[in-house]
Image (cartoon, coloured by chain):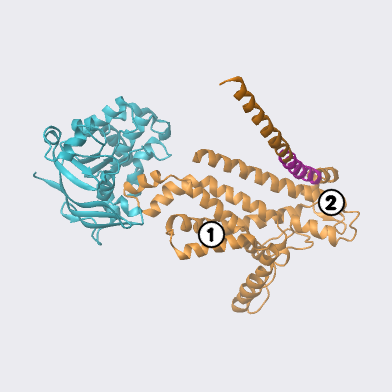
C-alpha cells in the first residue's frame, strides 16, 4: 500500500469518526441521563423514607400495638396481618399455580387451543388493575360464595358473607397467580430433555418422571415464584380494600373469618383518614420503611435464586 | 439365524409428511450384539428409538408396519408403553445421570417400580454396578452426586441404571461417541460381557467399534436398510455397492 492510499484511507476514517462521534456521544449522554434520573428518583424516595422514618423505626415500633387513637404506638397487628395474608395467599396460590404451570409445560400439546386460551388468560390476568381484583373478590367471594355459604349452612347468620382474612387472601392469590405460573413454567423448561428421556426409558410413567425428576429440579423456580408473589401480595392494597382489611383492631385475628390489619392499608388510612395526619407523619414513614424493607428483601432473595437457576441452566 | 428376539416387518416412520424410515424389515437375534451403522441422518438412531417407543414423545411422528418383540407387536393398542421400556432399556449418546446420588441413580428404576426396601435396593445397586464394571470405582462414594463423575464413569453409571431394571434388550445410541479412547474401550468390553445375558443393539458411527463389538451389522442409508448380515461378512465382502463404499470410507 503506498502513501497516497494510506492518506485517503485515514481521511475517510477520520470524517466517519467525527460524524459517529457526535451521534455516539449524544446517544451515550441521553442514555446516561435516563439511567441517572431513574437512580436519582429511587434514591430520593428511599432517602426521604429512611430519613423521615428512622426516628420512629425501632423494635418497639414493630412489636407494639397502635395507641391513643392510632396517633402513637407501633404497627404490630398490621405486620402480623400482612404475614397471615401472604401465608394464606401462598397456600392457595402456590399449589394452584404450580399445577397450572405443570399442565401448560408438560401435558398441553403445542397446538392445543385450550392451552393457548389458558396462556392468554394468565397474561390478561397479569395486567388487570388490582382494584378490579378487589371488586371481584367482594362480589364473588364475599357476596356470592360467603353469603351463599351462610344461607345454606349457617341459617342465614352472617359469618362468611363479610370481609375477612380468607377472602382477602384468596383475592390476593388471584392477583399473584400469574407471577407464580410464569416463574414455575420458566423453571420447568430448564429441565433438559435428556433427563426426562432417561426417566421414561427406565419405564417411568409421565407423572413419575414429573414427580421424581422435573419437580425436584424446579424447586428453586417454584420458590422464586412464591417469593415474588409474596412480595407482591405484601405490597398491594387495592385487592384487600373491600375484602378484609380493617382500619383498627384491638386484638390479632383469631380465625380466618376475622378481619385483619395490613401494612399497606395502614399507610393509606394513616395518610388519609387519621385524626391527626401531621402528628402521625413519622409513623407513616416508619411503616413505609418496614413495608419497603420487607418487599425489597423478598425481591432480592428471589433475584438471587433466579440468577442461580439461570447459571445452572447454562 | 435362530432365536429371533426382534422381528421388524415393513416398518416406516414419518415426521409429518417426511418419510424418515422406509419399509424396514429385519431380524435381531437374541443374546448377540447387533450394530447399526450408516452416515449421519440415515435413520439408524430413529430406528433405534422405535424399538422402545421413544419416538412416541415427538407429536409429529407416525409409524406403520410391525415391530415384534418376542412375537408381540409393541405398537399394538393393548401394549403398555411403560412395560415395553422396562423390558427394553436404553443408553443415550450423551450420558444423562439424574442430579441425584450415585446410589439413587441406580435405584431410580426400582423405586418407580415400588421397591423401597433398603436391603433389596442395596443388593440391586451393587449387582448393577458390578455388572457395569464400575462397582470397585464407586463403592465408597455411593452417596456422592453422580454429576461429579467423569464422562466415562457417568456413562457406565447410566448403563448400570439401565441394568438395574433388568431388561432383556439394551439399546445403545452411540454410547461412546463423547468419550475418550480408554473410556470407550471400557464400554466396548462391557458390551462384550453383557451380551451373555442381554440382546444388545448399538448405534455407532465408528466402523472399528462396530467391527470390534458386534456379531451382526445392519447398514442404513437414507432411511433404508441396505444390508444386514454377520459383521465379519459385512466388513469383508459386502453384497451391496453402497455398503462397500461406506465401509471403505468413500462417503459418509
Which span is picked out in magenta?
A27-46
Q: Nearer the viewer, residue A90 or B171?
A: B171
Query: Of the residues under marks 2 and 1, which one precedes in the sequence?
Result: 1
Q: Colour of chain A?
A: orange
The secondary structure type at the circle numbered 1 is helix
Chain assignment, label 2: A
Q: Residue under circle 2?
A: A283
Q: Residue at x 71, y 60 (%)?
A: A253
Q: Is residue B197 left or right of residue B144?
A: left
The N terminus of chain A: image quadrant: top right
* Residue B16 circle label: none
Q: Nearer the viewer, mark 2 or mark 1?
A: 1
**Residue B251 coordinates in the image, percent (x, y):** 24, 36
Q: Is residue B32 visible?
A: no
Position above or below: A256 against B28: below
Q: Residues within 10 Å of mark 2 (few under 14, many from 20)?
A: many
Q: Residue under circle 1?
A: A96
Amino acid at each position: 500500500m503506498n502513501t497516497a492510499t494510506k492518506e485517503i484511507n485515514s481521511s475517510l476514517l477520520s470524517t466517519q469518526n467525527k460524524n459517529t462521534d457526535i451521534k455516539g456521544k449524544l446517544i451515550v449522554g441521553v442514555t446516561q441521563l435516563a439511567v441517572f434520573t431513574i437512580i436519582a428518583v429511587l434514591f430520593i424516595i428511599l432517602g426521604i423514607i429512611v430519613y423521615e422514618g428512622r426516628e420512629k423505626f425501632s423494635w418497639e415500633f414493630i412489636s407494639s400495638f397502635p395507641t391513643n387513637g392510632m396517633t402513637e404506638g407501633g404497627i404490630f397487628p398490621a405486620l402480623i396481618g400482612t404475614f397471615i395474608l401472604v401465608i394464606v395467599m401462598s397456600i392457595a396460590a402456590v399449589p394452584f399455580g404450580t399445577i397450572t404451570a405443570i399442565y401448560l409445560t408438560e401435558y398441553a400439546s403445542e397446538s392445543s387451543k385450550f392451552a393457548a386460551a389458558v396462556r392468554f388468560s394468565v397474561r390478561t390476568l397479569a395486567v388487570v388493575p388490582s382494584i378490579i381484583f378487589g371488586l371481584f373478590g367482594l362480589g364473588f367471594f364475599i357476596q356470592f360464595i360467603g353469603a351463599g355459604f351462610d344461607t345454606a349452612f349457617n341459617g342465614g347468620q352472617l359469618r362468611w358473607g363479610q370481609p375477612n382474612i380468607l377472602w382477602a387472601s384468596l383475592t390476593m392469590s388471584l392477583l399473584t397467580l400469574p407471577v407464580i405460573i410464569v416463574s414455575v413454567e420458566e423453571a420447568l423448561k430448564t429441565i433438559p430433555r435428556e433427563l426426562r428421556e432417561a426417566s421414561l426409558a427406565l419405564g417411568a410413567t409421565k407423572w413419575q418422571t414429573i414427580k421424581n425428576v422435573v419437580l425436584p429440579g424446579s424447586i428453586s423456580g417454584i420458590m422464586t415464584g412464591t417469593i415474588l408473589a409474596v412480595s407482591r401480595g405484601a405490597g398491594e392494597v387495592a385487592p384487600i380494600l373491600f375484602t378484609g382489611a380493617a382500619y383498627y383492631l384491638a386484638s390479632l385475628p383469631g380465625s380466618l373469618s376475622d378481619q385483619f390489619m395490613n401494612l399497606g392499608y395502614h399507610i393509606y388510612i394513616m395518610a388519609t383518614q387519621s385524626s391527626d395526619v401531621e402528628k402521625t407523619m413519622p409513623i407513616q414513614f416508619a411503616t413505609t420503611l418496614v413495608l419497603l424493607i420487607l418487599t425489597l428483601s423478598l425481591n432480592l432473595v428471589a433475584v438471587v435464586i433466579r440468577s442461580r437457576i439461570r447459571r445452572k441452566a447454562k | 439365524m435362530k432365536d429371533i428376539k426382534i422381528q421388524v416387518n415393513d416398518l416406516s416412520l414419518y415426521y409429518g409428511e417426511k418419510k424418515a424410515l422406509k419399509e424396514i424389515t429385519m431380524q435381531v437375534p437374541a443374546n448377540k450384539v447387533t450394530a447399526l451403522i450408516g452416515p449421519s441422518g440415515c435413520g439408524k438412531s430413529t430406528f433405534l428409538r422405535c424399538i422402545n417407543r421413544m419416538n412416541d414423545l415427538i407429536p409429529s411422528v407416525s409409524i406403520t408396519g410391525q415391530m415384534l418383540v418376542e412375537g408381540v407387536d409393541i405398537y399394538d393398542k393393548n401394549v403398555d408403553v411403560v412395560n415395553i421400556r422396562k423390558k427394553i432399556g436404553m443408553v443415550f449418546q450423551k450420558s444423562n445421570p439424574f442430579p441425584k446420588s450415585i446410589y439413587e441413580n441406580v435405584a431410580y428404576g426400582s423405586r418407580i417400580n415400588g421397591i423401597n426396601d433398603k436391603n433389596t435396593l442395596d443388593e440391586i445397586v451393587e449387582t448393577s454396578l458390578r455388572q457395569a464394571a464400575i462397582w470397585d470405582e464407586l463403592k465408597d462414594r455411593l452417596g456422592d452426586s453422580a454429576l461429579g463423575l467423569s464422562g466415562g464413569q457417568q456413562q457406565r453409571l447410566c448403563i448400570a441404571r439401565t441394568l438395574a431394571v433388568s431388561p432383556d434388550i439394551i439399546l445403545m445410541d452411540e454410547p461412546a461417541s463423547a468419550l475418550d479412547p480408554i473410556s470407550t474401550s471400557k464400554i466396548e468390553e462391557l458390551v462384550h460381557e453383557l451380551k451373555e445375558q442381554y440382546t444388545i443393539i448399538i448405534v455407532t458411527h465408528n466402523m472399528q467399534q462396530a467391527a470390534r463389538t458386534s456379531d451382526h451389522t445392519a447398514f442404513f442409508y437414507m432411511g433404508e436398510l441396505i444390508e444386514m448380515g454377520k459383521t465379519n461378512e459385512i466388513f469383508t465382502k459386502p453384497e451391496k455397492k453402497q455398503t462397500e463404499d461406506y465401509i471403505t470410507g468413500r462417503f459418509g
